[in-house]
Amino acid sequence: MTRKALTLGLAGVGRIGSMHAENIAGLRDRFADRGIDLRLMLTDANDAHARTASERLGVGHAASVPELLAGGIDGLVVATGTQTHPELIRAGLAAGVPVFCEKPVAGSVTASLPLLDEIRAAGGTVQIGHQRRFDPGYLEAKRRYETGELGWIHSMRAVTGDMFPPSVEFLASSGGLFRDCAVHDFDILRWLTGQEIVEVYARGSNNGDPAIGAVGDVDTTLAVLTFADGTVATASATRYNGAGHDVRLEIQGSKDTVMVGLDERAALRSAENDVVFPAGTAHRTFAERFAPAYRAEMAAFVEVVLGERENPCTPEDAVAASAVADAAQESLASGRPVEVAPLALRL
């Protein structure tokens, strides 16, 4: 059988870029069965690092992003630092190829808005990396909500807890815990309910490493979210969840309640007598917790490039979640509730 060649270029072979590269390489057999010869080329600002990764995975290499684009790729995966996202998205648009870009679209909502206009004007496709949309638990919860099995939702509680904090150097440029971490909760809540978050009231504390406070961040946050229809939710996040990496979502409805992330590897223990669930070892990092979702996310991008599916996470979606994160950071600083301006009013 003659296979159709499809080449993805990947820029940025750091922690998450390396994971994406491995996942793409791991998809080759799956797409070969469908008559697609899936190929990959890597580039990185550290060329030696990119060469080493290319050799390890048995894939191609390019010395720069322009060389990568000149090689005739069919899609571009952007896994570089946030500050480079706009220029690489624009480079993909200019080359006329679909782009996958890790969140966020740009360093701020304000900086993202002109780029959204450019994407629309070019008729381009840009998929943003919010991997929770591909997690089986979140997908099932969304299905149950949409089929009416939960009834109407009266409360939601989202939890994101890292087992240990990243480096203070990273936190100094992360934009804050809401923008770096809780933004995933804001995105998944919008996606699951189909509702806009219209107001945020946020609080935070810093009882861990004083250096986190010194760079202007907190290590624990709680946000009370109000949706357009009046439904309320909470989203909590921390850098110090010693029990393990903990990502859960409890959805309480008028008919039933479901929880995403409640399995044998959940990072919690019951205080009730004779209860041994969950008995498994908790995940330590987000990469472990969402390994299947990251693979499914990259498979979805290949299908987007092939024209087989709609974009599962648009840049407008990602910027809307970032706008909630911005409002949360503002509320944290001011101590007051902050309204989230609809994205339509910003465009």
Image (cartoon, rainbow, N blue to C red):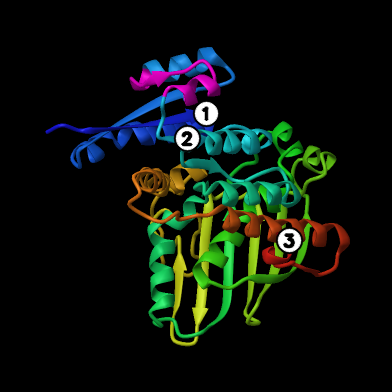
Q: Is the C-beta separation of discs 3 and 2 under 8 Å?
A: no
Which residue position is annotated with label 1?
A: 11
**3 vs 299: above or below:** above
Q: Is the C-beta separation of discs 1 and 2 under 8 Å?
A: yes
SS state under label 3: helix
Residue 276 visible? The answer is no
Which residue position is annotated with label 3?
A: 346
Q: Nearer the viewer, residue 47 or 209?
A: 47
Instruction: Residue at 48%, 38% (x, y): give it.
Output: 96
**How many numbered marks are there?**
3
SS state under label 2: strand
Which residue position is annotated with label 2?
A: 76
The span shown in magenta is 56-71
Q: Nearer the viewer, residue 184 or 100?
A: 100
3D distance between C-alphas at marks 1 and 3:
30 Å
Q: Quadrant of the C terminus?
A: bottom right
Q: Earlier in the sequence, mark 3 or mark 2?
A: 2
Front tag of 1 and 2: 2
Type of residue at label 2? Leu
Type of residue at label 3? Arg
